[in-house]
Image (cartoon, rainbow, N blue to C red):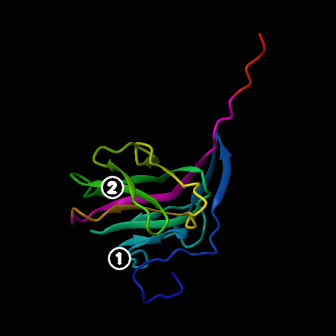
Amino acid sequence: MAASTNKPHWDSAANVPAEKKTEENAIVTRYPPKKLNIIWGNDSRYWRLPTENTGRPAELIQVSWLEVTGTYDGEKGKTYEIGFEVSLTPDAFGWNGCHVYVMAKVGKRGKYSWKRSSLENPKSGNFQIPFETLSIKVDDNPSNTDNKIYFGMYEVWSGKWKGGLKIYNAVIKEIIAATPSATPPS
């Protein structure tokens, strides 16, 4: 439970470490569920959160308002891809006819970019949403002082009750610019 147990929402635990490693032309940061803000996440009627940072997912029991968010300190001039590693339980429900949106923006006043994914015919096992790449670039303008990336996964518009979603990680990939290879002399 979060520090304030009378609140129904889970607030990101600052002491939970993110996992960071280099993979194919990207520096990949993974936020486990406890490092995210989860609306209704502090209420066991709606979510089952892992008790420790064990690699276990947060499991959605049922909500009509899905909102899972986080922030990441971006760097000027860098491009990031945002996503969530998820799976569905065999008894998942409520996903037909509604879309899950993954959204991101740079700075409090930034404009959201988004991609939507349908979970009607999900892949088996763990998969990443959005299915299409959601890229966002931090402006390298010297007058830009807010490089924080605000991101989230949402399904708040259908009003449908849904459940059976497991969230393993939020995934933030810093894309490493390919360096041009030197052309050998002829």
Residue positioned most to the front: 143
In the rendered image, which residue does mark 2 sit on? 100
Classify 107 as above or below 117.
below
Q: Nearer the viewer, residue 105 or 14?
A: 105
* Circle 2 SS class: strand
| Residue 61 can be seen in this image | no
Q: Is residue 173 magenta?
A: yes
Disc 2 versus disc 1: distance between alpha carbons?
21 Å
* Mark sitting earlier along the chain (2/1): 1
**Residue 182 falls in which quadrant of the image?**
top right
Q: Is residue 111 left or right of residue 20?
A: left
Residue 181: percent from left, percent from top: 71, 27
* Amino acid type, callout 1: Arg
In the rendered image, which residue does mark 1 sit on? 45
Magenta-drawn segment: 159-180
Q: Nearer the viewer, residue 84 or 148?
A: 148
Q: Is residue 103 left or right of residue 163?
A: right
Q: Is residue 146 left or right of residue 7?
A: right
Residue at 49% across, 77% down: 11
